[in-house]
Amino acid sequence: MPFPSAGRYNTVSAPLQVFARLQEALHTLPELRKDPITGRWVIIATDRARRPSDFIRQAVSKPTAPRLCPFCPGHEQKTPPEVLAFRQSGGANQPGWSVRVVPNKFPALGIEGDLDRQGDGMYDKMNGIGAHEVIIESPEHTLTMADMTEHQIEQVLWAFRDRINDLKRDQRFRYIVLFKNHGEGAGATLEHPHSQLIALPVTPKRVQEELDGARLYFDFKERCVYCDIIRQETTAGGRLVAETDRLVVMQPWAPRFPFETWILPKHHESHFESAENATLQNLAWVLRSTIRKIDKVLEHPPFNFIVHSAPLGENPMAHYHWHVEIIPKLTKGAGFEWGTGFYINPTPPEESAKFLRETGLA
Amino acid sequence: MPFPSAGRYNTVSAPLQVFARLQEALHTLPELRKDPITGRWVIIATDRARRPSDFIRQAVSKPTAPRLCPFCPGHEQKTPPEVLAFRQSGGANQPGWSVRVVPNKFPALGIEGDLDRQGDGMYDKMNGIGAHEVIIESPEHTLTMADMTEHQIEQVLWAFRDRINDLKRDQRFRYIVLFKNHGEGAGATLEHPHSQLIALPVTPKRVQEELDGARLYFDFKERCVYCDIIRQETTAGGRLVAETDRLVVMQPWAPRFPFETWILPKHHESHFESAENATLQNLAWVLRSTIRKIDKVLEHPPFNFIVHSAPLGENPMAHYHWHVEIIPKLTKGAGFEWGTGFYINPTPPEESAKFLRETGLA
């Protein structure tokens, strides 16, 4: 194809080598790392901002006195009726609870009806059937998870487990996502400490990707990829943040985001809802201390955590391993990431894990 | 597993049906739609915010007079030496250009070296080899793509094509991502109008997903899925935004984001870099008018656009079809989306397409 207006322009094309040397003088070579589960490659750009203080931050401000908060005790009538509550006094939908679970007033999915799969020309659709619930983590409006007692967080984890075990009896649901958005920058719209649960009639794509990748690894090695990760990380130690009897807190080999942190049970288990109480007790401690460390090192950033667990209605899986992913919101996803699923991470996990490990908080 | 402190708490569990009726009275049922290429399910939440004015917006402010902008004419020495320029006067790295392409001064990948694939225990890595270039779209600092002439945008598209055709001779590269971040909210760090190019030694995961899905469809139907989409959309019309001789502007059946808009060539073609001049001329017109429409309806939102094209070093593919995806940044991605790759879109594409179609701008 001829260049259309070649006469009008000069095309100046310098050979790539000319500026490569300049580049080399300024920078160290970045690394491409492959996530062993999904096969996703990530650019770990070692010459970019990497100190915690280098990140543009938007600190989550301390919640102030509540004004008409629908999640505060005494306002129980402002939410749909509760589906679960742990309480020391009071009746249903009255004050006296320590953790309360209610349907989301503006749910992303509806609970009633059939799935009703249909075509529309070449396209496929079904009714938006599912559950969308809010786990109110404490009656105290101004507490963040970092300030709660371990026992309070333990109760939140019990609520997670109880709700999954209740909802999984509904044959329409295939997967439950449990997540927390902390701070406006991470998508939270209400200040009162809460997490959310969405039950879906399909397995989400990223989860399916993990399941498929873990299955592929298992078929080849006859070992769980997550168990192998735990073994390598606890031996090497460079990406380890903390370790308890039952859990490992670590940063992954190929993190998509700076300070991305995973919590995994040491004992192989595919479904979060089968976690023993002692594991949840450990998890409460570990969640609290990890969030406190992140708060200290990164000065209270917004963050998300997501529980990754095996699909409902599956027997225990030898190849999949539940875990929690914590992602501080430090960078803005830009066109490159959205368009490709290929991430540029300015911070090697070895450095960020060291920062968290060395804060000295318990 | 027994509930550990059953004596201390009452567990109040109301049946799901109790509040379902309440929910039903308040809301219409959302819809789950499957993307025909990747198989990704999206929640189209019809009862949520759906008017353009309902979105929290962060308008991109008009660029002001430049202060020491490295992309402005006269400051050519502030960037690495140009690799391509269209100019009517001046020599290399001097003013007189209309479009200028330079290596990114802070590249995500390095241009020099071997890929050097290695293991690290169970993990895989390689050198971060690639190219990262900036396409400076105009010498005028304060122009946005919406204000440029069609001919100016056409030159930008020529630069895209020329750079791919140059870089693809490098056997280390497998894929080139072309994208634009417009506005700080979309990840832009410099105001001067520019787009970016990243050449990668691997095919990114989302692109591979499109390729695999399109291949699966082709194997089953013996037709290109994108060609089928174009046929269905131009017939139905509800998700169509505009149509020219050579291009279709439409919103997809299962958009991840409100106002997500795709531009596809009508004539089947897998590689952007083989686009004919007449197609690029059409594309310049269509890009300009689509951005103007988005600017008008959504009041100058930040946006990203990404060129999706087939991998380098592949022959023309019957199953893949290059296209451009434009994504206005209107919502904040939250924990649910990050953790699952499952998106909640508050706006049905039939409604958002109608808004754009009816703005009456050309």
Image: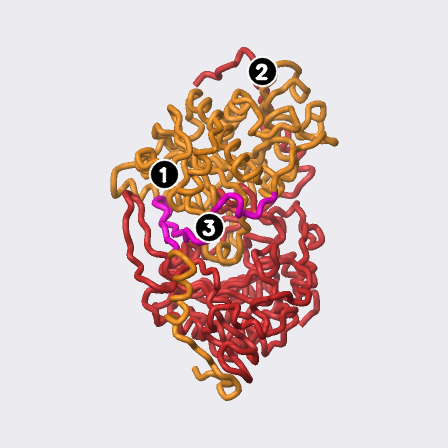
Chain colours: A orange, B red
Whether residues under marks 2 and 1 lie with C-beta atoms below 8 angstroms apart, the answer is no
What amino acid type is highlighted by mark number 3?
Pro
Magenta range: A30-58
Residue B320 in sight in this render = no
Q: CA distance from mark 2 to mark 3?
A: 48 Å
Between A97 and B39, the one lying in front of the other is A97
Q: Is residue A327 left or right of residue A38?
A: right
Identify whether B314 is placed above or below B155.
Answer: above
Q: For marks 2 and 1, give the one nearer the viewer.
A: 1
What amino acid type is highlighted by mark number 1?
Gly
The structure residue drawn at horizontal position 49% and vertical position 66%, both measured from the top left corner, is: B323
Q: Is residue B116 left or right of residue A340?
A: left
Residue B79 circle label: none
Disc 1 marks which residue?
A: A238
Identify whether B270 is placed above or below A280.
Answer: below
The structure residue drawn at horizontal position 48% and vertical position 15%, both measured from the top left corner, is: B4
The structure residue drawn at horizontal position 39% and vertical position 31%, both measured from the top left corner, is: A248
Residue A269 in sight in this render = yes
Disc 2 marks which residue?
A: B10
Q: For marks 2 and 3, give the one nearer the viewer.
A: 3
Identify whether B196 is placed above or below A290.
Answer: below
Q: CA distance from mark 2 to mark 1?
A: 45 Å
Give how far across and how far down residue B89 sits, in percent.
Answer: 55, 84
